[in-house]
Amino acid sequence: MNRAGHWLSAVLAITAGVIASTSEAQTTPVCGYTVVHSYSHDEGAYTQGLLFRDGTLYESTGITGSSSLRRVDLETGTVLQTHLLPADVFGEGLTLFDDRLIQLTWTSEIAFVYDRASFELVDQFTYTGSGWGLTDGAHRLIMSNGTSYLTFRDPQDFDTIRQIQVRDGLNPISSLNELEFIHGEILANVYQTDLIARIRPDSGQVIAWIDLTGLLPPERQRAEVLNGIAFDEATGRLFVTGKFWPTLFEIELVDCPPLPLFSDDFASGNTRGWSWSLEAGMPARTTESTETVASSP
Ligand SMILES: [Ca+2]
């Protein structure tokens, strides 16, 4: 079997394993997809963070020595604006809060804060442990670190507010990577799979899976794993891409619960058929998770 075959088998095995291990006790819906539109994407972009706000696509890329913050033209894939990170830093998750872009780093334990328009560095936060994915919702930042835990943080000082463990049934789902908060759901890429988990932000329960197997054709060449979810709230468009992928896809989900399941009124706990208090979940842990983390985000 050639390298591509080994790789495909490995991904299929992991994918099957994640779903199979979680389907014994219950049946969690698995969503399919259709491609609505394909856009060019910079094949040199090791995508670690992706978001779409007010008509603009923002991207964070990794790899020590070439990590960057970017503003990208969706239609052409052209990089319109770039900020290069320090040469010893590996860029990670990215989100936008109050006109400030916040970008994680993998092991530097620093989150950079930039002016949205100029990309000027205006602040930075520190944290303990690995930085993987970042998004925001319900007035909180939500961060992954390669484990099954998601951390809710205060956007003003990055302090930990609470954590949830993501589980499908009773099974923890580890290697949570790039994130997107969509009207009360957290979507998370699961590293080294073609799966995205749809997660309840109060309990961490997986509501449904999105299986993107086959999205990028086998001739993907140097392309690596799926990693990058962005949502255009104005139009409801859902975008996905991956590390070194030549294409960014707009997709629609099929054969699954509608997206979003919830209303935007998540903070009040007054959502469709669900009721909770944002602060009433698992209390903030005083130490970082010691769960085994994959060697690379
Ligand atoms: Ca995202």
Image (cartoon, rainbow, N blue to C red):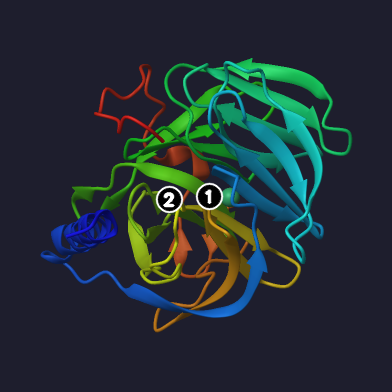
**Nearer to me, 11 or 130:** 11
Residue 213 image point, x, y percent? 36, 69
Which residue lies at the image location 68% right of the left edge and 24% below the top edge? 85
Instruction: Assign the N terminus to one quadrant of the image.
Output: bottom left
Q: Is residue 137 visible?
A: no
Residue 76 location, quadrant: bottom right
Which residue lies at the image location 52% right of the left edge and 72% below the top edge? 259
Does 89 appear above or below 207? Answer: above
Q: Is residue 102 visible?
A: yes
Which residue lies at the image location 67% right of the left edge and 45% below the top edge? 59
Residue 289 location, quadrant: top left
- Categorize mark 1 by other alpha carbons within 10 Å: few (<14), some (14-19), many (20+): many
Amino acid type of the residue tagged 2 in the rendering: Glu
Does 85 appear above or below 142? Answer: above
Q: Which mark is residue 244?
A: 1
Does 55 appear above or below 66? Answer: below
Circles 2, 1 touching at the beta carbon (< 8 Å) = yes
Which residue lies at the image location 78% right of the left edge and 37% below the top edge? 82
In the rendered structure, which disc, 2 or 1, sits on the residue that comes first in sequence?
2
**Residue 223 located left or right of residue 126:** left
Residue 154 image point, x, y percent? 61, 29
